[in-house]
Image (spheres, coloured by chain):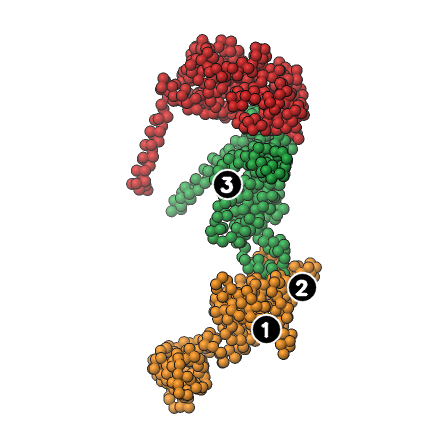
Chain colours: A red, B green, C orange
Amino acid sequence: MLTKRASLKLATAFAALMIAGGAQAAEKLRLLTWADYAPADVVQQFTKETGIEVEITLSNNEEMISKLRATQGAGFDLIQPSQDRIAGPQQEFGIYKPLDLSKLKSDLFIASMLEATKKNTTVDGKVYGVPHIWGTDGLVVNTKAAPNVADYPDLCSPAVAGKSSFRAKRPTLIAFAFANGMDPFAAYKDQKQYADMMEKVGAKLAECKKNVKFFWDGKDQLLNALRSGEVVAAMAWDTGGWKLNSENPDIKFIAPKSGALGWVDTFAIPAKGRNDDAAYKWINFNMRPEIAAKVAASAGNFTASNGADKLMQGKLKDQFAESFPKAAIDNIKWYPAVPAGIEEIEGKVLDRLKAGS
Amino acid sequence: MKPARNLTLFLLLAPAVIWLGLLIILPHVEILVLSLSERVGPRVYKFGFGNYLEFFTEPLYWRTFARTAIMSILVTVITLVLAFPIALYIARVAQGRLKAMLLLLCLLPFWVSELVRTLGWMMLLRETGLISYLLQMTGLVGQPVEMLYNDGAVILGLVYGGLLFMIVPLANALESLEPSVVEAGYDLGGSRWTVLRRIVIPHATPGIVAGSIIVFMLTVGNFATPVLLGGKNGLWFTEQIYAQFITRFNWPQGAAFGMLLLVLSSAIVWAGLRLSGQSLGTTLRQA
Amino acid sequence: MRAAMASSSDLDLVAVTKRFGPHLAVNDVSFSVTRGDFFSILGPSGCGKTTLMRMIAGFEDPTSGDIRIRGKSMVGVPANRRPVNMVFQSLALFPMMSVGENVAYGLNCRGVARAEAEQRATRMLERVGLKGFAERRVTALSGGQRQRVAIARCLVLEPTLVLLDEPLGALDLKLREHMKIELKQLQSTFNTTFAYITHDQSEALVMSDRIAVMNQGRFEQVGSPRELYHNPATPFVASFVGETNRWSGEGGGAGGTDIRLAAGATVHSTGIVPAKSVLCFVRPEAVALSANAESLASLPNRFEGRVSAVLFDGANSSLLIDTQGFDQPIRAVLPQAGPLAGIEVGASIHLGWTADAMKVFPA
């Protein structure tokens, strides 16, 4: 039998639970995104305007998809995978919800980028993603220590032996394929051809391995190594390069001869999202030029918002202009949607690269 | 009367049963079921052993496992060799406050997370790190030395992480050894080595086995240390599992690897118990 | 003379002292143990006898002095190189080995071949009455059997000297009585020198050829059990060895033999007692009892008292007698065969003792 005091405690606990449950009912947007994509001041302003609270979880492409797959698309109301990671996982796992484009203000987007992203994220005639932030993968080089690095294969040259780095991930495979005169994106549709191509690239990378200090994994790990001079040339994102450039002018982001790899991070709605209205509100709010400019500054990247570039700070613009002459912009290789099965092929090549000695 | 007693027993056991069922058995059953499904096409799976077959037919995978297992055994042996004198000192020489201090010292690294500990090692071992700097200062080497990103660094990190789990059961076992038994060993003409081999080690065997099982299992299943300290050539089996689940979205394959890790490492432990002539029961009592 | 002594003795301690910080555990102890003797060191706990034994075994080093075995100095020789083996108080059998392995252990250490060691161990076990026990676990033995294994383990090495550290302490009374006799028999069959330490005077008296009584780090007296019992050299020996009545008093002086006890009675001793405070000791069996005063008329010390307690213990039965002039009841042996066998509490009784039955020491 419960004592009087114990039952009182139980009642209090129960009441507390009810109140907590009540608080849960207040409107909320559960956002799964990348670091720096939702700066605190932007979130505050959104909550002030709409009364919707934003709960942010930080992640990366692979983990975003894995998380949604585990719950079959539940747990979040809005997510931001790269545009090439929408069609494939949608076909395989059905983790996204088609977008209602009528709820989006399409004139807020750069028209060409919106069209390209819609095309890439269309499955069975339905659109699953719209663009938000874009950037490129290229080379971050300490131009004083490694003046001759101009393309991906230069990371394998004796001049930077033991002082170069790249990730043991798919962008590296794609980059080295282009650098060796192949076109991996054209081979996406033919898995046999793609597998042969990846074998060749894998062999190239295996040769290059002795030159590499480590396969970098976290951005900070690489930036620290570049800062200390342990690494002098690496394949990495433009933002990291520009960040280091602000600290040390010798370190530059270089668009490789064979072309920088262009990526676009999107807005997409999970299959079992509970608050689509809030999600659309967040997208429209974020694409407003003045908000988009703030987010772009926080992420150190560019935005798909129409007109935001005029509001951006000068430094990043200058750095972009230095890294990307006109020809380099035209040479950016934009990732097409990854068909299902491609990652399987790449995965094995990468596993062998990491395991082999 | 009797039904009431049964109810009491049931209620007392309920938390343990629920805990075992929900947190241990159920997930494993789910993993097992998952591991037996093969992908045929988008969202189409069939029952089959293909994922297990993949492990044995693709040298990459079983070699990674073999490498992981051999290095884990090596780590266990090194940990044992290092922990034994420390445990012996704590159990037999140190008294009172000193003893408590020493145990606390062993425990101290575990007050921070494994990640932080590993990052600490990275700071020490990297080319621009403290040890490299000291070596240059003393003129022992002419240029910066990189001690990170190789198997040695991985073993170092894993041994460091496993030391406590070896010392505690060992010290426990050694503490119960009566001092006069050791003295009798000397008195009857035994050398230090004879006493160690015929009296101290046999007495500590349950502790050695318990510590070794814990360290081996922790090492085989470790993720952060090999990933962070390991080189471009060192792939740990857990990384394969992670890769299958997270970067490859191939859950059935990852599940099969997970089951294989469980079964194969248990088999190694079983073999170790057979070799040392210990039963799991006495070992668990010691631990 | 000295050389002759050294050649016939197995163990010689010369002015051995051991300090633990400021504490003097063993204070300038010298003695010799003759070959084949059963030698006991008897003393209360904390008297330093265990430290002494551990120095002989080699577990402690003396602060000063020398320990010689068969004339060879043992200082600096580690325990495992001394021709001395020890039976520990806890026995310290190796629980991880079988009975046979326990006995063969020392032989293994000496490099005796496995088969021969096994054979010798088996033979030794037979000799101590443990035939067929070689394969047993030591944990499966009774207390007495464990005792025999512990001794067999030492004797198989044919040591010059066997040290025994109160090995009977853990046994129950009946077994202890039995093991006393067995130990003595073992010692005489093997003709090995035994050094035995104990706080139990009856163990020491029953088994030993010679006994050293130790107190506060020093030897009070060394002698045969009989000497110690009948001619104690110090008040400590008199009271520690055997039962005794003990009174303090004052000598009459002036060349007299009278002693005035603190509680009033006057007693007479044989020698001249100076006018100082003294201690008097009389064994209970030296106290003569009688129902009438006449039969005790020849005794110089005669008193009358009242029985305050009858301590019946078979052949060891005794009486406590309240006597005028004594601060404590006098203890006297009560013969179970005599006319007083049936005496009851409260009965009046006469008692007395001869002058030479009383030992007198300056206090």
Please tell me in which quadrant of the rendered image residue B156 appears.
Answer: top right
Q: What element carries label 1?
A: strand
Which label was assigned to residue B109? 3
In the image, A345 versus A249, the foreground residue is A249
Please tell me whether mark 2 sits on a helix, a strand or a loop. Answer: helix
Residue C139, above or below B55 = below
Let me know if marks 1 and 3 both belong to one chain: no
Q: Is residue A69 visible?
A: no
Quarter residue C71 falls in:
bottom right
In the displayed structure, does residue B140 sit left or right of residue B287? right
Disc 1 or 2, which lies upstream in sequence?
A: 1
Write the residue at 59% across / 42% down: B76
Q: Say yes or no: labels 3 and 2 on the same chain.
A: no
Estimate how packed mark 2 is, as few (under 14), some (14 to 19) or many (20 or more) residues with alpha carbons within 10 Å. Answer: some
Which residue is at the front of the view, B192 or A355?
Answer: B192
Measure the C-alpha gap from mark 3 to mark 2.
Answer: 53 Å
- Is the residue marked by circle 3 packed among few (<14), some (14-19), or many (20+) residues within 10 Å? some
Disc 3 element: helix
Number of on-image labels: 3
Residue behind mark 2: C120
Q: What is the number of the mark on residue C33?
A: 1
Q: Is residue A62 above or below residue C298?
A: above
